[in-house]
Image (spheres, rainbow, N blue to C red):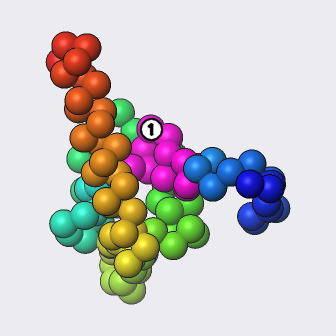
């Protein structure tokens, strides 16, 4: 497959593009937590151990920019912001589920607890 450019960056294959959009330590866990419900920032922060505020904010912005989540801001005091999956976000859950299942299989094979 020939190289291609997306948002000013050169990619060498489509897997690289997908992994950049949903890979890393935090994006898949964020998407996974939004699979069944809409959540507020504080709920996500509390539900994802070890993530910093800065990292959560960055990852949410990138997921929104790439079209995987919706960000709904309500004009109330104090401000209320909710995050939910878009159709694209729901579609990628199949892939995340397969990756998760494979990870669980590897953990079992390696006797990782």
42, 106: nearer the viewer = 106
Quadrant of the image occupied by residue 83? bottom left
Q: Quadrant of the N terminus?
A: bottom right
Q: Residue at x 50, y 62 (%)?
A: 63
Direction from residue 62 to residue 38 in the image, left or right: left
Q: Residue at x 30, y 33 (%)?
A: 103
Res. 112 in view? no
* Image coordinates for residue 39, horizontal then vertical, percent: 26, 66
Mark 1, Cα crowd under 10 Å, few <14 / some 14-19 / many 20+, is few
Direction from residue 52 to residue 76 in the image, left or right: left
Tell me: residue 46, above or below residue 60.
above
Direction from residue 2 to residue 76 in the image, left or right: left
Q: Residue furthest bottom?
A: 75
37, 81: nearer the viewer = 37
Magenta residue span: 17-29
Q: Quadrant of the C terminus?
A: top left
Q: Main secondary structure of the magenta part?
A: helix
Q: Residue at x 58, y 50 (%)?
A: 15
Quadrant of the image occupied by residue 101? top left
Tell me: residue 24, above or below residue 80.
above
Res. 27 in view? yes
Secondary structure at numbered mark 1 = loop
* Image coordinates for residue 6, horizontal then vertical, percent: 74, 64
* Image coordinates for residue 88, horizontal then vertical, percent: 43, 73
Tell me: residue 23, above or below residue 67.
above
The answer to whether residue 110 is magenta is no
Q: Residue at x 50, y 40 (%)?
A: 24
**Residue at numbered disc 1:** 25
């Amino acid at each position: 497959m020939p190289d291609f450019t997306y948002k000013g960056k050169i990619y060498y294959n489509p897997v690289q593009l997908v992994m950049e959009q949903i890979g890393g330590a935090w994006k898949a866990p964020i998407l996974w937590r939004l699979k069944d419900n809409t959540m507020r920032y504080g709920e996500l922060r509390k539900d994802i151990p070890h993530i910093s505020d800065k990292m959560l904010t960055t990852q949410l912005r990138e997921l929104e920019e790439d079209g995987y989540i919706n960000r709904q801001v309500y004009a109330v005091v104090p401000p209320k912001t909710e995050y939910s999956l878009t159709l694209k976000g729901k579609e990628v859950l199949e892939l995340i589920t397969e990756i998760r299942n494979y990870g669980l299989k590897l953990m079992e094979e390696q006797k990782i607890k």
